[in-house]
Amino acid sequence: MSHTFDHDRKPRGKALAFRLIGAVLVPQLLILVLFLLPPLSPHGAYAPWAMLAAGVAGLFWWGVRFEATIDDLRRLLDRWGQGDFSPPAVSQGYQAPDKLARLWDTARDVAELARRSQAELQARAARLEGVFQALPEGILVLDPEGQIWAFNEACHQMLRFEATDPRGKPLEAVIHDAKLAAYVQALRTNGRAGQIELAGGDAGSRSFEVQGARLMGQDHRPAGFLIFFHDVTRVRYLERVRRDFTANVSHELRTPLTLIHGFVETLLDGALDDRESAARFLQIIREQTERLDALMDDILSLAQLEREDQEPVPLEPLSVEDVVRESVELSRVRAQERNMTLEVTAEPQTMVLANSRLLEQALINLIDNAIKYSDPGKTIRITAEQRGPWVEIAVADQGWGIESRHLPRIFERFYRVDPGRSRELGGTGLGLSIVKHIMQIHRGEVDVESTLGKGSIFRLRLPAVSNLPSIA
């Protein structure tokens, strides 16, 4: 608690001036008077009077010094009471008596120690505040009455307080969430509460786990409440993806397996004797087996890519022209089967830092999709050029195109624009998802531009490598 001294007790300027006059002029006047008076002994000895005058002068002088030092100490303690521990100045015009001087030196030492302690506490508080604000978890501190006492930046971003500075305000006044308000009320009533999950962000796009605890003071009395907000949006998204993936894989496996099982049963029931029917059934079984094989290949590719998301992938400087032409050659047979033309335009000596196997896989997937979803006889153009810090590889077809409502989702796993036609053409619904994963591994990106009935352009963008020697 801060203490201040009664300023009426401090000597005023006029009173201090009178003391100075009394300490300096009065003794001198006494000495002058004593010398003018007749001597008190026949020998004219003024010694007793002189000694008396000197004693009075010394007493006045010592009193003034004493009181000035006491006043300085009083002002020093007053500053301490106000939290000011700056080094005290030496009393102006006076030198403290020896014993008071030692007290004054001790006070100066105490002030210096207090100042250092205060600076250290402030530095510690600043470090703790920095840690508090840097924590990725949202932290909200309430006082015993349920008013907001402190919060960090993560909490502010999660809860989006309506007030500019919500400190000192009741929680329900700045956060209109009935579920959170009920949780805080239960925490205040019972001192503990379980864990709940809140939806936040735009249209509930984010999910937060909320957990709270009561804070106890040094006197073992409630000092407030601490509430943690853990962002589980990514976790819930991955859980949903896993559920959807399991459901989609089960569905994709069930259809071909059901067909294979049915036709095998038909063959075993006597259809083998009908060679024409048996050949047709076996052809269907073969197609469904190839579909299963393609599906398993894509699933394994996705699993491997997800592992490579966590592990370093070997990257090396590659000629984009070489990668593009190799991918086109591997896709040419399929294009020729549908009487389609593959045209290549690639800038020479354009380099990227990439994994040749993965980059070829992504490019082949895009070319294969262009072949599947275009009419026979069309032309597919593959271009590669550097645009600023990026190298852009584009696959443009003259196919059926994609409606705009499908474009935001076509890179999701098992998402199909036309499920029936996609399965008929042998698509697994994982090709574009694989392309997206490959670009993430390369710190690149993929996007699409499409017009229904006119075709699509898929673009791969990878960081360019500059000032590297060309590959012969």
Image (cartoon, grey):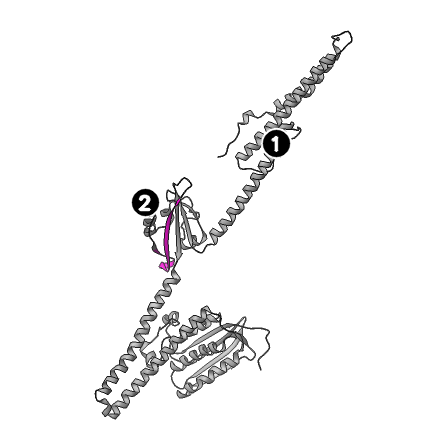
Find out whether residue 198 is within the magenta segment. yes
Q: Position of residue 17 (x, y in %)?
A: 64, 23
Q: Position of residue 432 (x, y in %)?
A: 40, 74
Say if 115 sits above or below 286 in the image. Answer: above
Q: Which residue is mark 2?
A: 189
**Residue 59 occupies quadrant:** top right
Q: Closer to the camera, 26 or 211?
A: 211
Q: Closer to the camera, 154 or 35?
A: 35
Q: Which residues are magenta?
A: 197-215
**Residue 200 occupies quadrant:** bottom left
Q: Earlier in the sequence, mark 2 or mark 1?
A: 1
Q: Position of residue 450 (x, y in %)?
A: 41, 75
Residue at the spot x=34%, y=78% of the render? 422
- Local secondary structure at mark 1: helix
Q: Which residue is mark 1?
A: 104
**Residue farthest along the right direction in this orientation:** 43
Residue at the spot x=59%, y=27% of the render? 70
- Residue 451 in sight here: no
Amino acid type at mark 2: Thr
**Residue 137 occupies quadrant:** bottom left
Find out whether residue 281 is within the magenta segment. no
